[in-house]
Amino acid sequence: MTETAGQHFDWVDVHSNPAALPDGIVERFLALEDMSATVADALDALGVHGCVGASTLIPTLPDERVVGRAVTLRNVPSRMDTHRAVTDGNWLMAEIHLVELAEPGDVLVISGLPGVSNMGGIVAATARRGRLAGAVVDGAVRDVAQSRRRGFPIWSRDISPETGKWRGSSVEINATIAVAGVTVEPGDLVIADETGVCFVPVALASEVVARCEAIDKKEEQMFADIAAGLPMSDVINQLYGGRA
């Protein structure tokens, strides 16, 4: 269902915020050892393509781990001449409105513009104040020192000093978007760490985390066996089910 956006963002098609995540699901994912890699294995077992490597979506704070509900924004290139847009004060980006609508713990997910910023320091500071978990941007960001200083983690394709404010237009909030070839629905679970970003369909979240916990338990035993000096043939048999 579509809502009316605030008067300052009346050019954007704004949809209702997605449903809340299942209780306890965020904490269970955060407890995983190799979070995004384990989630990727679980998604593989379910036939779901949902992960993007950290060489494509690069973390600004590599030590950070984020799990949260996706709230989405889609940006498209502007048809207006950049200098004319600056002169007329004609900007049509709405990432700050996405932050305004988001709830604590949410992750901003932006299908953005390449080579120019889709969010900067002001948005990062506002998102941090609102206790949002982080942002994933298929496009560029800027003011990275500002977001780092505030401890607000971002995964993006690129960093650029050029603003997107005069070069792009936000067209839809909380609708289906594509991020680096992965379809993302508002409400999907975002899993992000130094290895990459995974998007888990919310309907599969409980099954995925249960599979991940089983993988973690198995790998914990394998690491213990390696440390104890177990023959590698035995370790490999555990990993591949006897097919070394």
Image: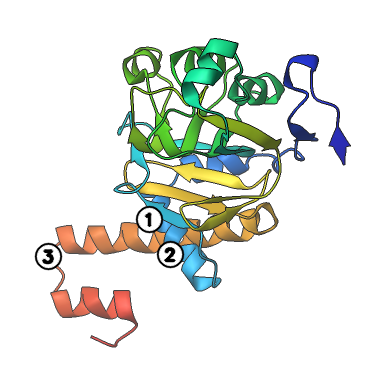
- Disc 1 versus disc 2: distance between alpha carbons? 6 Å
- Disc 1 versus disc 3: distance between alpha carbons? 25 Å
Which colour style is shown?
rainbow
The quadrant in which the C terminus is found is bottom left
Q: Nearer the viewer, residue 177 or 238?
A: 177
Across and down, in percent, residue 153 comes to: 41, 27
The residue at 33%/28% (across/down) is 160
Across and down, in percent, residue 217 comes to: 41, 58
Disc 1 and disc 2 in contact, CB within 8 angstroms: yes
The residue at 43%/64% (across/down) is 41
Amino acid at dot 3: Gly
Please give the residue where the numbered disc 3 appears in the rendered image. 229
Horizontal side of 4 relative to 176 (left or right) equals right
Please give the residue where the numbered disc 1 appears in the rendered image. 37
Please give the residue where the numbered disc 2 appears in the rendered image. 41
Q: Earlier in the sequence, mark 1 or mark 3?
A: 1
